Amino acid sequence: MNLSKRQEMILKKLLEEKNAIKVKELSSALGVSDRTIRYDLDHIDYELKHLNTSLKRTPKVGIALEDKGALKDLMSLWDTSSYVPNLDKEERLIYLGLFLALEGKPLSSEYLAEKVCTSRSTIISDLKELGPILEKEFALNLSAKKHYGYLVKGTEEKVRIYLTELVKTFLVYRRQGHKIHYLTSELESLMDSDLISNIRKAIKLCKKIHPFWLPNESYLTIVAKLRVLLLRIEMGHVSEKSSLASINHNREYEIAKELSNQLEGLIGLKIPQVEVNNIAHDLLYSNVKTTTDRHGSVDPKLIDTVYQMIKVLQNYISLNPDNIHALKNELISHLELSLEKIQFGIPNINYLIDDIKKNYFEEFHIAKIILKVFEEAYDVKIDDDEVGFVTMYILKNMELSERKKEKNILVVCCSGKGASKFLATRIRNNIPNIHINDIVSVFEVEEQDYDADNLDLIISTVEIKNALKPVIVVSPLITNQELGKISKALFNTDHSLLQAQLHHSKNLTKQLEYRIMSMVSPELGEQLMIKLSSVIHDFEESNRQSLVYKDDIEKPARTIGMVLMEIGSMIQNLQSRGYDYEFLTFWGLILHIVLAVPRWQSGSFNVEPSIEKYKKKYPDVYQEVKETLERIEVNFEFRIMESEIIAIMRYLCKESV
């Protein structure tokens, strides 16, 4: 029987229903007009004559089959599951565009209506909307001629870009569990699961030879681009000559060449040289990052430029040596790629730029200031997207801290590498006793391409299906509330933790009282303790509501108390050497420490211009304070800059500069 998918569906409904069905019921269920259903019924009736049966049409009752038994065996062979009776407008536009772009020849509105299983009038309305979209977003033209049909016109490059966007949409649909309706055999072939798997396998094999990293969004785009590239080669559509002949000197070309070899081995299709160049271009466009230098060495001018950028940065943000070293390497790697993209006129899109500007306004403008050094050195203009990437690297290094290895987590981030590192660092910085095993793409998790044996939790910026471990979904710029949710999931903490911390703080305060009393007269000690208890109590209350539940977290009052005990020991040592201090000295230093501890924990420090002067004039005091702060660094696992030594010495040496 020669029936369309919709006609097969009508026949199946007639077979399943015990009673007659009215035309209105069929048209409503299938999303087409009554007239279309009547035309379909006429065609079905004609085809049924070959089986010596027919439709029974009863006025005001409906339509039924004369002999259902003659059709049961035939219907069991039909696959009507791929038929979609009610595509919405967005879906129809996707399918229409795909049919037109794949065919490359004029298609009538009747043919398209049949393919999309809707009425001709609906198709004509959809095509009027599709035309401006193709022209505005993809530089393609949808031409229409009477008695001729609709045709998509454009260069091979533009057609590929459009097809890539459609394939990417279908890949997203599939990952999200949205049913892909294979209305034609061409579409089914395009989205063949085995072929898509082979493309992903080729990428994975290539990464073992030339280690590289792609953001999730770019990974999806590369898979879609490779699928379209293979399709166009199969269809005999030769790519226009690549304008990037010089790209064969770049690391992206080496990756593209290996990727082409892997694809040829897995799929058995020869990839022309011009297409290898195009793959290299796509990799460069997609922010591919490698773990090795692309030429074995870095341009000395770029190294000097980055050093100058960091020097300017230190006027606004204090960084410890580890931060400076890490930031230097990251900026060199990132800006080297940025220069390459500028050379080939490829935009560097930052999908988080609006969030960065909104939530990290100050850091964004600091990044813009330091990038002026880069602009002047290379005579280029940097846009806000690029400023946003550099902001992420600055934020990541501001958050950098030591980590403890107890709970093992996996981080899954769909944004760029800078955003992924920043997310991981934020988690590591704010939740103690964790170890981040790796930062991976969502596809690696869904394909179970990771070691889950020692994993406690997966933290992801997107929903994940079929994960081997529990998953918590967070925003790319993770909030304190989300950090608390992670900590609670890992350590199952509750309000009883707060009470235990407060009890411990009281014990520490008592020990601190004994220490202060041993250093000064009873009257002076009592005054100090009254003021100190009041300050710590107010500080503690202000932080109570914003407490993020963590296992073994250092509560502000507890941390301040323990730090002050170290400062007390330091003062005792200095007193034993003949240094004598008054009440105001003690009180000023205590207030300084109470306010300094939160700064130290967050990585913010004073800027002191007189470091060398104090070191030379008061070497004994300098050494004592330095050793005390080093003990505090070790005990509480946060860095303290040398400038903070001088800030404390200002109280102890009775000198202002």
Image (tube, rainbow, N blue to C red):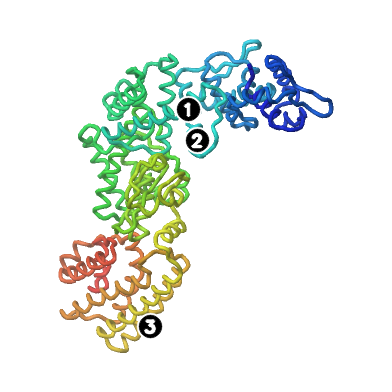
First in sequence, mark 1 or 3: give its number.
Answer: 1
Confirm or deny contact between disc 1 and disc 2 (CB under 8 A): yes
Name the image quarter holding the N terminus: top right
Q: Which residue is mark 1?
A: 191
Residue 2 lies in quadrant: top right
Residue 437, x across and y down, in percent? 32, 50
User: Would residue 432 appear left or right of 492 to someone viewing this image?
Assistant: left
Regarding residue 657, the answer to whether it shows in the image is no
Q: Residues within 10 Å of mark 1 (few under 14, many from 20)?
A: some
**Within the image, what quadrant is residue 576 found in?**
bottom left
Residue extending farthest to the right is: 60
Horizontal arrangement in the rendering, residue 220 relative to residue 324 (left or right): right
Residue pushed farthest bottom? Answer: 522
Image position, residue 424 (x, y; %): 36, 50
**Measured along the vertical axis of the image, is residue 428 above or below residue 578?**
above
x, y percentage for residue 343? 34, 28
Q: CA distance from mark 1 to mark 2?
A: 10 Å
**Residue sitting at 34 percent across and 25 percent down?**
266
Res. 608 mark: none
Q: Amino acid at mark 1?
A: Met
Element assignment for label 3: helix
Residue 528 vs residue 651, the one in the foreground: 528
